[in-house]
Amino acid sequence: MKDINETADDFATEHGTGLSRRAVLTGAAALVVPFVFTPARKGAMAATAGAGSIGAYIKIDTANNVTVILGASEMGQGILSGLAQLVAEEMNLNWSQVRAEHAPASIAWPNPYGNPLFGAQLTGGSTSTRGWYAPLRLAAAKARDTLIAAANLQEGGVWALGQGGTLTKGASSITFAQVVVTASGLPLPSSATLATTTNFIGQKMPRLDVPSKTNGTAVFGMDVKVTGMKFASTIHAPVQGGTVKTMPASVSGTVLYNLGTAVGVLADDTWTAMKLAKSMASKITWNVPADPNAADSAALATAAQGLVASPTATAFAAETVGSPSVTPGASSLDATYSLPFLAHATMETVNCTASVTANACEIWAPTQGQQFIPGLAATITGLPTSAITVHTTLMGGGLGRKFETDYVAEAIKLSKLAKVPVKLIWSREEDFKNDYYRPSALIRVRAAVTSAGEITDLIYRNVSPSINIQRGTLPANNPEDTGAVAGAVGLPYQIGAKLIEYVPLVPCDVRLGYWRSVGESYNTFAVESAVDELALLAGKDPLAFRKGLVTGPNGNPRALGVLSALETLTNWSVAPASGTARGMAFLSGFGSYIAMAADVGKNSAGQAVVKKVYCAIDCGIVVNPDGVETQIQGGIAHGISATMWGEVKFVKGVPQVTNFNKYRMLKIGEMPEVAVKIVTSSEAPGGVGETGVPCVAPAITNAWAKLTGTRLRTLPLYPGATMGDD
């Protein structure tokens, strides 16, 4: 997910800057610790809202367990555990007494549970640790000092922090639980000294969510049970952007519910509801968009081809240095790279449980965008937001899809219409056909290089549909969509003159959304493929070429650090095994630096097979090394699937992929060996969840070019593959 800072501005405008400093938390004593909130959307929020306070909430129960209530959503990335480690460090806890919970949704601005980077209660863009690291540590340190002050007041004397949630005075010891009520009434210190220990920060702590996920007690969205609930399924128009035109009130005694963009049915179990939904499809007619070519892959590709070369296209100059000019010749490159629409294909399809009554609305959702939901529910139900309660469940993958609220809206509408609690689960087919797809992209790169390995000129043009224009956050005639060029602007490479342009592909009626690493996922493929081709033109080793581009008076030490670490990790000067070749790619993004190499060979059909992947990453201060490694491994698996087979085509608005049978994914036996080197860094934490994806495609295709002499510039490498293909 990207462009969350723009989203934050929208919330500030809509909801104002009111703030509740304290909240009532039931079931345990609670220590509410405010800290300074300074969102930095180009300084806009700082100017309009000033400094306010938001709360990090810490509950301490009678058993002296410490629960941290967090605004970030857990979708498998381990964020609740990682953030809880920060609190454990500052409060000198035992890991066995630490708990973490999702915070309730809030629409206040600034949001009491909002990410300090941008204020809103959203999870995406690899921002959770980046946003919460310093503020949450400070909040926990203030909580610690307040507990000590409470002990001094309540028990008398001078008390000190002990181990495992205790306070000590000489031989005497008391628990946090014994003084938390007193602490909750004390004024908070204006400052606190952070711990210098490393009992938790930088350590491989076991994740808090793993036990419940292994013993079956974890509650994902699909696991929610509400007394008296019905199970729902919906069916949508076969064409992107369609709405209900005509429908019967019922079919074979089953009531049909018109939801505007879908029709829903209720049953006593999910399977029956899904079968009923499929059976009623022929009874419904739909209004469809007037221009079918606006959601047709072939027509959009033709339009993009025209725009990528057109001197009159309305382009946004995202970055300009000097006046670049590229003359065709032996030392210049003119290449076009093409990438398709992609589905999120999360393992857990979108789902939501809602219970709407005359006086209240309660929602259980696997969501990345809690802050959107109370206002949405209020609009649908007519209730005030104070009557809306949102419970965030665990997610079986988010990847940006569950930032959206279409499935939440459908569940609320069905509950309101049927007057019963409703659990809505989309079928896999509906999930694929009604995704918010990653935009396709056609990118032209023109560049000149010297024999000394210097890039003297670069002209880069990205033509792709705009998420922001489609959603109305930018007018249709304004191409300034900075997220579309993420991964192409601000490169750490030293380049003489350059022009980075974006041309929006409009109109586009394919529903667009934030896909893991979004703009970086397509721009990095073009940038790093082009850099590799330029290295070849200059007669340079690709790794040495990149090291040269980040070295010198204007060089970037962190970029050089990961490139050097990759060199060591791969033993770069030694060729890989016979029959394989090694390609590499580099990314500076999400506050981190990453260099990746892939060893690629061929299978019996002559297709590429990834044998091993090496990754060096500088993501600043590391909270949990295990979390970094697993996120990189997951990003690599995700990236391989997209590189090799990922594609959703549209024919006159109809998506051609409806299930995994036509959306090939990496199989467990195909997962390559992965070696991860975390570069030690004292810089602020960077992002990891999105960072592992973008380099995968160029590393593979660069290796393939070296192995075969054939340069592949179009993804996926093997379109039309099925899960039956090896």
Image (cartoon, rainbow, N blue to C red):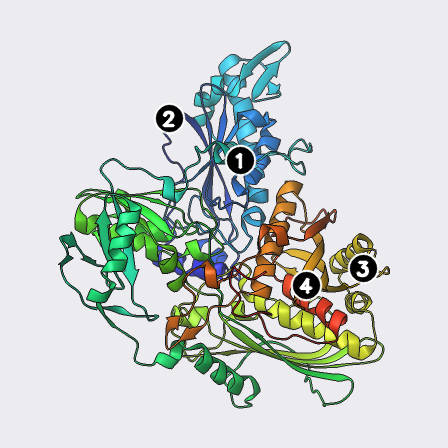
Q: Secondary structure at mark 1?
A: helix
Q: Amino acid at mark 4?
A: Asn
Expressed as whole percent of the image width and height from the top left, the position of residue 138 reads 57, 38
Label 2 sits on residue:
27
Q: Dot 2, crowdedness within 10 Å: few (<14), some or many (≥20)?
A: few
Expressed as whole percent of the image width and height from the top left, the position of residue 98 reads 53, 29
| Circles 2 and 1: CB atoms closer than 8 Å | no
536 horizontally vs 101: left or right: right
Give the quadrant of residue 250: bottom left
Q: CA distance from mark 3 to mark 1?
A: 37 Å
The mark that comes first in sequence, 3 or 1, is 1
Nearest to the observer: residue 324 or residue 522: 522
Q: Amino acid at mark 1?
A: Val
Q: Is residue 173 above or below residue 82?
A: above
693 horizontally vs 394: left or right: right
Expressed as whole percent of the image width and height from the top left, the position of residue 63 reads 47, 19
Q: CA distance from mark 3 to mark 2?
A: 59 Å
Label 3 sits on residue:
576
Nearest to the observer: residue 693 or residue 16: 693
The mark that comes first in sequence, 3 or 2, is 2
Give the quadrant of residue 709: bottom right
Label 1 sits on residue:
210
| Circles 3 and 1: CB atoms closer than 8 Å | no
The mark that comes first in sequence, 1 or 4, is 1
Q: Amino acid at mark 2?
A: Gly
Expressed as whole percent of the image width and height from the top left, the position of residue 199 reads 67, 31
Label 4 sits on residue:
603
The mark that comes first in sequence, 2 or 1, is 2
Q: CA distance from mark 3 to mark 4?
A: 17 Å
Q: Amino acid at mark 3?
A: Pro
